Image (tube, rainbow, N blue to C red):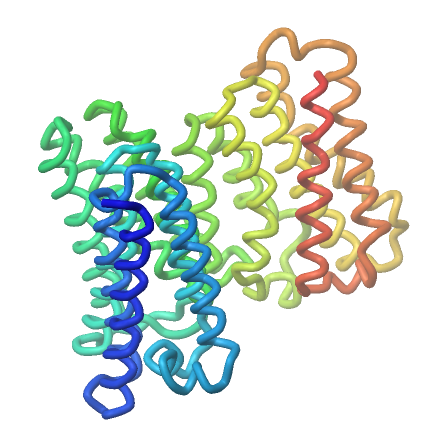
Amino acid sequence: MNPLHGIGAVLCVLGLLLAVASWAWRGGRLGDEAARKSVHLGMGLICCTFPWLFAQAWPVLVLGAIAVAVLAALRLVTGLRRGLGSALHGVDRQSWGELAFPIAVAGVWYLADGSLVRYLVPVLALTFADAAAALVGQRWGRWRYQAQGGMKSWEGSLALFVVGTVVVVLPLELLTTTGRWESLLIGVTIGWLIMLAEAVAWRGLDNLFLPVLVAVLLERFLPLGVTALTCRLLTMLALTAVAWLLRKRSTLHDAAGFGGVLATYAAFGLNDWRWLFAPLVVYLLYPRLSPPTAANSERVHELDAVAAVALPGLVWAFLAWRVPAAELLLAYHASWAAQLAIIGVARFAYDDPQRSLPGVVAQALAMSLVVLLPLPLLVWGDPALLRPWCLAGVPIALGLSVALFALWQPGLRDCPLVWSRWLRQSSCALAAGVPVLWC
C-alpha cells in the first residue's frame, strides 16, 4: 500500500473510533473507564496492523506525531475535550496515557528494526494486559492494595499477569522458532514485569516505558536458552520478594519499592549479573546509615524519589547495552556511589543539625567509596582501567558531584522531598560517572 494511503486510512479509523466511543459515553452506553479502555483497545489493534501497512519507519513516525498533536488538542481545547475527546477524559483522574501510547508505538517500531514479533509483542502487551486488569478489577476486584496513584485489586493484577504472559507466548510460538519452554519462560518473566509496571504506573506513563522495556528485553531474551532464561525469571522473583519482605524496613511506599525492582531488573536484563550489585547495596544499606528513629523511618518516599535515584544508572546501563565497554560498568557504579553518598549526606545532616557540612560530606563519601567502587574498578573492570587517572579521577569526580549537591540543595538539613531536590540529586549522580569515559 502507498504509505500516504495507509496514513490516511489509519487516521480515518482512529477518528471514527473516537467518535463512536464518545457518542457511546455521552449516551450512557459506556461507563467512564469502559469508554477510555475501548479507545485504548482500538488504538492498540490499529497499531498491530502497521507491519502489514508500512515497510518503512517514516509513516509510523508521522502517524505518531499527528496522533500526539491531535490527542493534545483533545485534552487542551475545551470544545474538543467535551466532544470528540469526551471518551478519553471522562475518568476523574489525571493521566497522560493517551499521549504516551503513540510515542511508545513509534519507539517500539524503531527498536524492533523490522522484526515482526519484536514489534507485535510489546504492542499486544500494551493493548490487552492493561485493559484486562481494569475490567477484571472493576467487575470482580475484592482484595485491594495501595498502588501508585490509587487502589488496585489483586484480582486485576492476576488477570494482567495471565494476559501479559499469553500475549507474549502465543506470538513466540506462532511466529518464531523459539522452543516451547523458552517461550513460556520469556512469557512468564515479561508477564510478571508487566504486572509490576502496572502497580507502579503513574498518570499513565507506564504506556510509555513498559512497551519500550518489553521490546528491549525481548531482544535480549530471544537468543537465550532454558538455563539462562530460568535464571532471569528467578532473579525477577527474588527481587520482588526482597522488595516485599523488606518493605517496612525501608522508607519507600510499596509502589516505589516495585519501581526499584523494575529499574534494577532493567539494568540486569540489559547487561549481566554484575549490574545487580550497586542498586541492591544502596537499597539494603541506605535505611541503616543512621540509627532508626520515628522521624527517619517513615515510609515517605514515592516513585519520583526512586526514579531520581535509578535514572542515572539506567542511562549507563542502556549505553552499555548498545556499546559494551568496561568503562560504562564503572560509570554505573560511580553514579550509584554518588547516590548512596548523597542519601548519606541528607540523612547525616538531618540527624545531626550541629555537625559541619564538610564532615558530613567526608563521611558519606568515604562510605560510598569503600562499599561500591572496589569491585568494578579492581575486580570486574578491564586492567586498562587501573591507570592513575582512573584510580584518582573517579574518587575526585565522585567527591565533586556530592559536594556540588550539598552546596546546591537549599534546606539540606530539612531533607526536602520535592521534585527540585530529586532533579539536583539525579543530575549530580549522573555527572559522577561522566569522567570515567576518559579512563
Q: Closest to the observer: 264 or 438?
A: 438
Above or below residue 10? Residue 341 is above
Tell me the residue at 32%/31% (across/down).
Answer: 219
Residue at 31% from the left image edge and 58% from the top image edge: 8
Instruction: Indicate left or right for 117 with 96 as reference.
Output: left
| Residue 134, placed above or below residue 82 | above
Tell which of 175 and 259 is nearer to you.
175
Quarter the N terminus occupies = top left
In this view, which residue lies farthest toward the top? 383
Residue 138's x, y, as percent?
23, 77
Q: What is the x, y in percent for residue 177?
A: 12, 26
Tell me where residue 378 appears, x and y as whole percent.
62, 14
Residue 421: x percent and y percent?
Answer: 71, 58
- Position above or below: 201 against 184: below
Quadrant of the rendered image containing residue 206: bottom left
* Residue 3 left/right relative to 181: right
Query: Which quadrant is the C terminus positioned in?
Result: top right
The answer to whether residue 254 is visible is: no
